[in-house]
Amino acid sequence: MITEYRALRASVLRLWAATKTEATQTDELQQLTRFNEAIDQAMTESVARYTEQVNRSANLFMGILGHDIRNPLGTILLSAEVLTRSGQLSAKAAEPIVNSAKRIQGIIELIVDFSRAQSDGVMPIRPQPGNLEKQFRSVVDETRVRHPSTPVQINATGNFDGAWDEGRMGQLLSNLLENAITYGTKGEPVTLTMTAGSGDVKFSVHNQGPAIPAQDRERIFEPRSRGSAADEQRAPGGLGLGLYICREIVRAHRGTLSLRSEPREGTSFTVSIPR
């Protein structure tokens, strides 16, 4: 598209120059200036409109994909459960099916959340009264089951009653823990530290391992962005949506998400949200 506009500009200017027989007048220079400004404006608006249409189509596709895959995926999980209960399939044989289906389900949820955040401008949440420590301990227990070789520790001090979207907060912590386990040093502990203030609560997820390069520390929160080549090798096939979803969940709760990563200290993602 840009090439076509350039060709248009060049053609018009060439034809204009070919008709010139006398010295250029002031009004002609003004017309030439306006012509160039008009071409630049048309080019800018066309590129912006094209980009918007591409993004809208991509988000619509991901939303439809996420919605339509949920039904057959639910059928797979239900069928595996029925076959196991009836004795037609052993629990050991069903385990890879269930695990794979749950992994696909997690990817679909990321896609749907990404599509919602892009279309609505903010992640939709439904805050309800609850205790964040109690919920987070359940998420940590689930993570320990999925990653038995990685110690996951939790340190909590204070009262953690408040009003949040518990599902989203659980998703936030689960994503941060998975990220820490995936990119941290294998076998080294991952630590969740929770502290309570009068009007807000804070929690951080820390792991030991290589520091995140300075040039990646902002980019990894952007959608469909990955870290360095080494990170790609350790976690191939990712969508690059996990940390973006985390950022949007925190933003929807009017909180902040910060990152600190040093070679000797390890990496910490810290969240602060109002009660």
Image (spheres, helix red, strand yellow):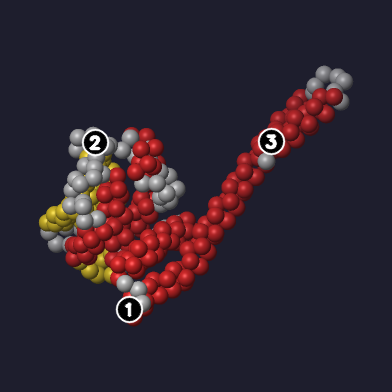
Regarding residue 33, the answer to whether it shows in the image is yes
The CA distance from mark 3 to mark 2 is 45 Å
The CA distance from mark 1 to mark 2 is 52 Å
Foreground of the two, 54 or 263: 263
| Quadrant of image for the N terminus | top right
Element on which disc 2 rests:
strand
- The residue pinned by badge 3 equals 3
Image height of 16 relative to 112, above or below:
above
- Label 3 is placed on what type of residue? Thr
Point out residue 168 in the picture as x, y percentages from the top left corner.
32, 62
Foreground of the two, 78 or 238: 78
> Who comes first in sequence, dot 3 or dot 1?
3
Q: Which mark is residue 87?
A: 1
Regarding residue 204, the answer to whether it shows in the image is no
Quarter holding residue 23? top right
Element on which disc 1 rests:
loop
- Label 1 is placed on what type of residue? Gly
Point out residue 37 in the picture as x, y percentages from the top left corner.
67, 35
Q: Which mark is residue 162?
A: none
Point out residue 65 in the picture as x, y percentages from the top left corner.
51, 62
Q: Residue at x 12, y 59 (%)?
A: 158
Neighbours of disc 2 within 10 Å: few (<14), some (14-19), many (20+): some
Image height of 261 relative to 87, above or below:
above
- Whether tag 1 and tag 2 are in contact, CB under 8 A, the answer is no
What is the residue that sits farthest to the left in this orientation? 157
- The residue pinned by badge 2 equals 262
| Quadrant of image for the C terminus | bottom left
